[in-house]
Image (cartoon, grey):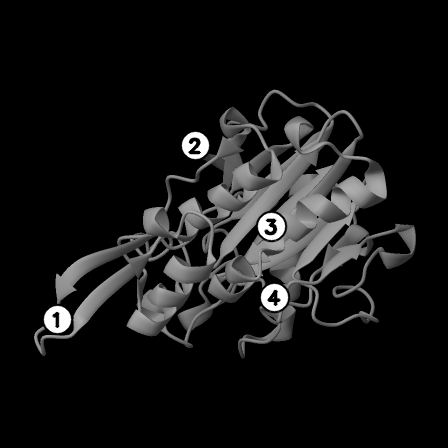
Amino acid sequence: MLELHSYQNRDGSELPLLESALFGSFSGIRHAYATRLGGVSEGEWSSMNLSFTRGDREKDVRENFHRIAEHFSVPESRFVLSHQTHKDRVRTVTEEDAGKGLTRERDYTDVDALITDVPRLLLTVFWADCVPLLLYDPRKRAIGAVHSGWRGTFSRIASKTVEAMRREYGTEPSDLFISIGPSICGSCYEVSEELSERFLRDFPGGERIVSFTGRDAGGERKYHLNLWEANRQLLLEEGVSEDRIELPGFCTCCNPKLFFSHRFSGERRGNQAAFLMLL
């Protein structure tokens, strides 16, 4: 389960970050899941908005990134940002990608997952209900960071990231440790009957991730989708050990004071980010 820790920004203000208990014993990586707290953004983006595309002031977003950079003791030129479009593309990150998305332009699009074996590159993915996943192979010293909404989950982006790490670095799934980050829980994630039927029909363990929860006031059937369990099933299917998959215990929609949530707030919100770096 994730743990909430409190750090300090250089001005003495609080910087709350979530960290993985599963990753806690490893000295070869640093990681964190940002909350919506600890930044300088105002209004609907208050305060640790890390997205340049939500309408927030760029200077505030850059200050928020600077605070994260100081926490990790790296310059902004060591960040590598995803370019998320709810696809299933995995990018192999090299030293040449340093700074892309933050200090220089990206030369890639449609990238919802990043993998690397290069030290001190801070892989960065974004979310505001979708599922962030962080992957670590201590044997091959390789990492991955994934953004997986329902589309990415249905397209099995978590599986494809494991497969990419096997192909690029020789990762064995049984060597992986994987943290599933804060995201919308199954109780909050109501979906259409059509989507629920797609998962029941075409997804491994569909009966464990889709639930019928009664009818609404108009008599329509209500369905909920558990993306935590869906991604866990994908990882188990790939051969990841059950005791090396960590569920978050934090729902973004249940905790709107701690997280930005699309389901809770709609489009008027910021985005959090997840970070993972080899040392």
Residue, disc 3: 158
3D distance between C-alphas at marks 1 and 2: 33 Å
Residue, disc 2: 1
Q: Earlier in the sequence, mark 1 or mark 2?
A: 2
3D distance between C-alphas at marks 2 and 4: 29 Å
Residue 61, numbered label: 4
Q: Would you place residue 209 above or below residue 232 in this image? A: below
Q: Position of residue 133 (x, y in %)?
A: 57, 46
Report the amino acid beneath label 1: Asp
**Is 2 placed left or right of 254 in the picture?**
right
Q: Position of residue 174 (x, y in %)?
A: 65, 28
Asked if residue 76 shows in the view, the reply is: no
Which of labels 3 and 4 is toward the front? 3
Instruction: Categorize mark 1 by other alpha carbons within 10 Å: few (<14), some (14-19), many (20+).
Output: few
Which of labels 2 and 4 is toward the front? 2
Which of labels 1 and 2 is toward the front? 1
Report the amino acid beneath label 4: Val
Q: Are marks 3 and 2 in contact (CB under 8 Å)?
A: no
Report the amino acid beneath label 2: Met
